[in-house]
Amino acid sequence: MTGIGGFFFRARDPDALNRWYADHFGVVMIDSQDYDDPGWFQDRGETVFSAFSQDSDSFGAPEKTWKINFRVVDLDGIVDRLRTAGVTVEPHAEPYPNGRFAELEDPEGNRIQLWEPNAASIARDPRGRGHSRAP
């Protein structure tokens, strides 16, 4: 395996939610029937893949079963842009050993975490490349 090739989920209004992710995070959404359009190409970087216990409050409402984490370069800048656009976003009060985080929800109540990796986290890259600019 070389990485995650897609992230798929149900939505009450897929077109509106796809536009929201494109507008706020630059995630390119493609028509699932059109194999000629390129998808969203991300910068290389660390990805955490982890199951949580069913009683975890990390996902918001109990019926929510997933949360996505986006790596970002400028957490303060994206928090400002989101707030200017009317999106509620809450940065964590303190940094963690691997960087800084903020939490928000998409219009359908799905949890999103923003992560600005710090130098120690980037240094863990086994190929020594770190990451380049990301949204």
Image: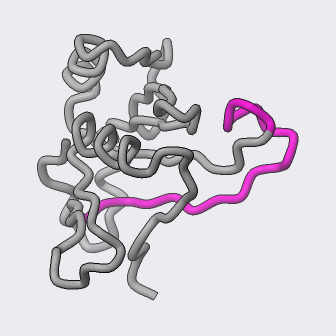
The image's colouring method is one colour
Height in image: 118 above or below 18? above
Magenta-span inclusion, residue 52: yes
Q: Residue furthest right?
A: 55
Height in image: 80 above or below 75? above
Q: Which of the 4 quarters of the picture holds residue 64?
A: top right
Pick the residue in front: 15 or 88.
15
Residue at image position (25%, 19%) is 76
Height in image: 21 above or below 40? above
Q: Quadrant of the C terminus?
A: top left
Q: Which of the 4 quarters of the picture holds residue 22?
A: top left
Height in image: 85 above or below 115? above
Q: Position of residue 73 (x, y in %)?
A: 21, 38
Residue at image position (23%, 57%) is 28
Q: Position of residue 33 (x, y in %)?
A: 33, 79
Residue at image position (43%, 73%) is 4
Chief SS of the magenta region = loop
Q: Is residue 77 left or right of residue 52?
A: left
Q: Is residue 83 left or right of residue 49?
A: left
Residue extent of the magenta highlight: 44-62
